[in-house]
Image: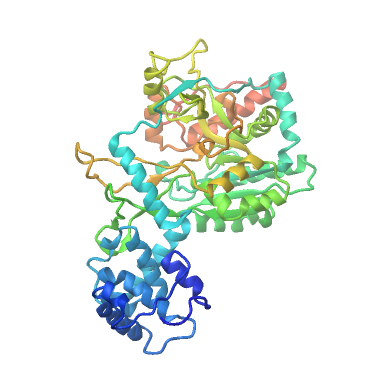
Amino acid sequence: ADRGARDPHSAMLSRLFGREPVSPKVKENGAYLKKHKGLQSSLNTALNAAILAQGRAWPEEVDPRAYMAAALRVLPELGPQLAALDLEHLLAARVLIDIGQGHLFKGWAPAGKDDDRKRAFFAQVAELERAYPGGLKAYRDNAVERLKEAKDGANPFDGWTPEVPTGERIAAGSDRFFALERVGMDVVGHTAFVLVAGGLGERLGYNGIKVALPVDSATGISMLEWYAQWLLAFQSKAGGRRKVQLAIMTSDDTHAKTEAFLAQHNHFGLDPAQVVLTKQGKVPALADNEARFAREGGDVYSLETKPHGHGDVHSLLWKDGIIARWTKMGVKYVAFFQDTNPLAFRAFPVMLGVSVKNKFAYNSLTVPRTAGEAVGGIAKLRHTDGRTLTINVEYNQLDPLLRATTHPEGDAPDASGFSPFPGNINVLVLALGPYSAALKASGGRMPEFVNPKYADGAREAFLKPTRLECMMQDFPKVLRPGDRVGFTQLDRWLCFSPVKNAVADAAKKAAKGLPPECAASGEADMYNACAKMLAASGVRVEAGPTVEWQGVP
């Protein structure tokens, strides 16, 4: 401990202490030990464990002072384990203990037993630390704040009044539609596309990745091949001089399968260099209002983790350097789409045209929304302090917000028969300049919320562990003041028919007069959109009979 602070291990000590390291002179009868009772015993215990752990011979790359500092930090919770832990394990343990997670080490077997499982635990902790912007400390700190707000019943819309937002409602096939489409086609070659594809098709009764599902049974083309064909068409229309970039956000469930599916089909004609996969991680589950991390079942060596939400797509594009790379390539816009809504690509040229004409930093594709429909609505919110925010408001929040402010009738239709607040479908176009600037300012962090299910009226206990979540459509909260936010509304038949429900669930929705949104309806809607476009172009298309299949019309 008498050696100077500035040496090859300075960076490691800085990680341990969180500041420029200082090595105090520790003497057995010195003033330092008098101020820190019990330190001598702790030093001896840690030293013995450290020597034992290193086989009584320190490798050159390990600084015994750094090991000792970490060992002392975790000694009360992890003292019996020191002989089995290396320096990186101790650093991870220090992070957990510093943020109130010492309970995770209770019930561990003594050193020499279950060591492989302990190493697996620390590997999981290291991965969680890397995945979250700011690491686990930032996650825990944010969780404490959000959990307190939830317990106190804080209203996220307190002080805000909703207004009908600014945007363009465009009839398919109109002169305005074609004019904007032409403007959009001028920039489509400078647009990168992002596919959000982190889920499996379990709700559909399908165990594979959803992008492998067929768009229709006439051609058998998969969703991913359909998207690749559109990108190649855009590329060709732009002159073929630049390759349209595609990023795919995957998850633990879909990453390997998506890689294999692309390789198996030679990337469907795309150059592998123009496709990048970025994998979404998970976050620790939260057991209580103190944001203590939950264990996985009865396993003392495993943390329960949960998905963080599709808002991670923004963080990943920033963290993985994809935004920086696209900026250097001259990309001007970034277009986001979901995994099983193949009609969305028919809207992108018009959306891009709307973004160019209106100088929108953020543009949501929307559809006419039936009042009360379980679809979020885009609203312009005005705060009592003068701020404004155009953003998606979830359907279960929109009605009470309207009733409490300007619309005593709540979520009701206007003269058009639809809600004045257009329905959000999570298809987005963002201008790269403002997008990149906002991500840089936030460090890639997204606004988060928590939705615990309480087991008691006092909101002290949870029915099951919860977690922080984020949503991709909340990005306007990250944008800078002055960045313009708006929407493009098109007819539902042209741009929105997702495939997300099993047949039985789809039949129940259809019985209520709602879109069934299953594989059969998605296929029929594809044919219907093609027929309508042909008819609008002067082609005679005969209408077939309406049929019902297992309750789905």
Question: Compared to 33, does 218 lie above or below?
Answer: above
In the displayed structure, does residue 321 sit left or right of residue 449? right
Question: Compared to 142, does 127 lie above or below?
Answer: below
User: Which quadrant would the N terminus be assigned to in this image?
Assistant: bottom left
User: What residue occupies the far top of the structure in this picture?
Assistant: 415
User: What residue occupies the far front of the structure in this picture?
Assistant: 31
Colour approach in the figure: rainbow
Question: Compared to 227, does 299 lie above or below?
Answer: below
In the displayed structure, does residue 231 sit left or right of residue 5? right
Residue at 80 percent of width and 43 percent of height:
239
Label count reads 0
For the residue pair 367 and 281, the one nearer the viewer reads as: 281
Residue at 52 percent of width and 29 percent of height:
389
For the residue pair 296 and 492, the one nearer the viewer reads as: 296
The reply to whether residue 105 is in sight is yes
For the residue pair 401 and 419, the one nearer the viewer reads as: 401
The reply to whether residue 512 is in sight is no
Residue 373 picture location, percent across and down = 42, 24
Residue 182 picture location, percent across and down = 75, 29
Residue 450 picture location, percent across and down = 36, 42
User: Which quadrant would the C terminus be assigned to in this image?
Assistant: top left
